[in-house]
C-alpha cells in the first residue's frame, strides 16, 4: 500500500492510495465520514427566549454549527463515566449566548457564542436568528464528542469521496485528431498538440466516457479504463479537524475494529 499526498491545505486534502481494493478504500471513506469524533452542541438550556423562534429550532440550529475539536483533551461522554446529565470538563465544553435587540433589529451570529475553552465555532459568520427590538435570548449550550453515524452534525467532512485512477490510451495511427473528444470533455483532459491528440491531464478524468462516445471513428481509437487498485481521495473538512487528522483518526478506528474482531474470533 502506498499513499501520495496530491494536495493539502487547512481545509482540503487530496491523496492517491495505491495497492488496495475497493473494500478497504470504501471502509476508509465511511470511517472518515461517520466514525471520526467531533464536537457539536447536544444539550441547550434556554434561560430566556422571547424571540419568534421556538426553543427547539434554536437548539437544532446551534447543534449544526461546526465547532473546533480538540481530540486530545476531551473524551466521549460514554467513556468519561462522570454520570452527569450535562457532562463534566473532561467530556463537555460549555458555550454561552446572550443577545438583545435594543432599538434596531439585530442578527445573532455564531461568533456571539462565548466559550472559555478552545471549543468554539469554526466560523463566526453563521447566522443563528434575528431579534426584533425588545427581544432577547440567553442560553447555555453543552458540546460533546459524537460521531457522524449518530447524527450528521458530528460529521467532520463536507466532502469525502474517491474515484479510481483513470487510464487513457490513444491509438495515434487511427486517430485523425478531429478534436470532437477535446471539445466535449468538460475537464480539459485531452488536447490537440500540432496534428496529434494527446492526454493533457489524465488525473482530471471523471470516467464519464463522453470522449469515447463523441469519436466519429468506429471502433474509437481512444480507450478510457481505470486502475482497480488505485484511488484518488478528496476530503474536505467542515473545519472541526484538519483533513490530515480526519484521515489518521479513520485509520485508527479501522485498526481498533480489526483488533476487536480478532479478539472476538479468538474467544470463540
Ligand atoms: Zn464527563
Image: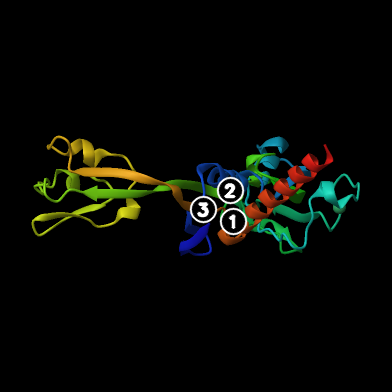
Q: Which element carries disc 3, helix, strand or loop? A: strand
Q: Quadrant of residue 130?
A: top right
**Residue placed most toward the observer, 233 or 49:** 233
Q: In the rendering, at what x and y percent does residue 160 appear?
A: 52, 48
Residue position for label 1: 247
Query: Which numbered disc flags the more N-terminal residue, 3 or 1?
Result: 3
Discs 3, 1 touching: Cβ within 8 Å:
yes
User: Could you tell me how far apart the alpha carbons at marks 3 and 2 are, in whole angstroms?
Assistant: 11 Å
The vertical placement of 171 against 10, above or below, is: above
Q: Quadrant of the C terminus?
A: top right
Report the number of numbered marks.
Answer: 3
Q: Which element carries disc 1, helix, strand or loop? A: helix
Residue position for label 2: 28
Q: Local crowd at mark 3 within 10 Å, few (<14), some, or many (≥20)?
A: many
Q: Quadrant of residue 260?
A: top right
The vertical placement of 167 against 4, above or below, is: above
Discs 1, 2 touching: Cβ within 8 Å:
yes
Residue position for label 3: 235
Label 3 or label 2, whichever lies nearer to me, is: 2
Q: Local crowd at mark 2 within 10 Å, few (<14), some, or many (≥20)?
A: many
Amino acid at each position: 500500500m502506498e499513499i501520495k499526498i496530491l494536495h493539502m491545505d487547512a481545509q482540503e486534502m487530496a491523496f492517491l492510495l495505491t495497492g488496495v481494493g475497493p473494500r478497504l478504500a470504501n471502509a476508509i471513506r465511511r470511517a472518515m465520514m461517520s466514525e471520526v469524533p467531533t464536537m457539536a452542541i447536544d444539550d441547550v438550556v434556554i434561560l430566556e427566549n422571547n424571540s419568534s423562534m421556538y426553543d427547539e429550532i434554536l437548539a437544532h440550529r446551534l447543534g449544526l454549527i461546526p465547532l473546533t475539536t480538540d481530540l486530545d483533551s476531551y473524551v466521549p461522554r460514554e467513556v468519561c463515566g462522570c454520570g452527569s446529565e450535562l457532562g463534566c470538563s473532561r467530556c463537555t465544553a460549555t458555550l454561552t449566548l446572550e443577545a438583545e435587540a435594543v432599538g434596531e433589529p439585530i442578527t445573532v451570529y455564531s461568533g456571539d457564542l462565548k466559550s472559555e475553552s478552545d471549543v468554539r465555532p469554526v466560523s463566526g459568520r453563521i447566522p443563528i436568528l434575528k431579534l426584533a427590538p425588545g427581544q432577547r435570548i440567553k442560553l447555555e449550550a453543552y458540546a460533546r464528542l459524537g460521531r457522524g453515524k449518530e447524527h450528521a452534525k458530528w460529521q467532520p467532512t463536507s466532502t469525502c469521496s474517491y474515484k479510481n485512477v483513470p487510464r487513457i490510451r490513444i491509438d495515434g495511427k487511427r486517430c485523425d485528431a478531429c478534436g470532437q473528444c477535446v471539445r466535449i470533455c468538460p475537464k480539459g483532459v485531452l488536447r490537440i498538440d500540432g496534428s496529434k491528440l494527446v492526454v493533457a491531464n489524465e488525473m482530471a478524468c471523471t470516467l464519464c466516457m463522453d470522449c469515447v462516445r463523441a469519436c466519429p471513428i468506429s471502433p474509437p481509437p481512444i480507450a478510457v479504463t481505470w486502475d482497480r487498485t488505485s484511488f484518488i481521495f478528496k476530503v474536505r473538512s467542515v473545519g472541526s479537524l484538519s483533513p490530515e487528522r480526519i484521515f489518521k483518526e479513520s485509520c485508527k478506528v479501522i485498526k481498533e475494529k480489526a483488533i476487536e474482531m480478532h479478539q472476538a474470533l479468538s474467544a470463540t
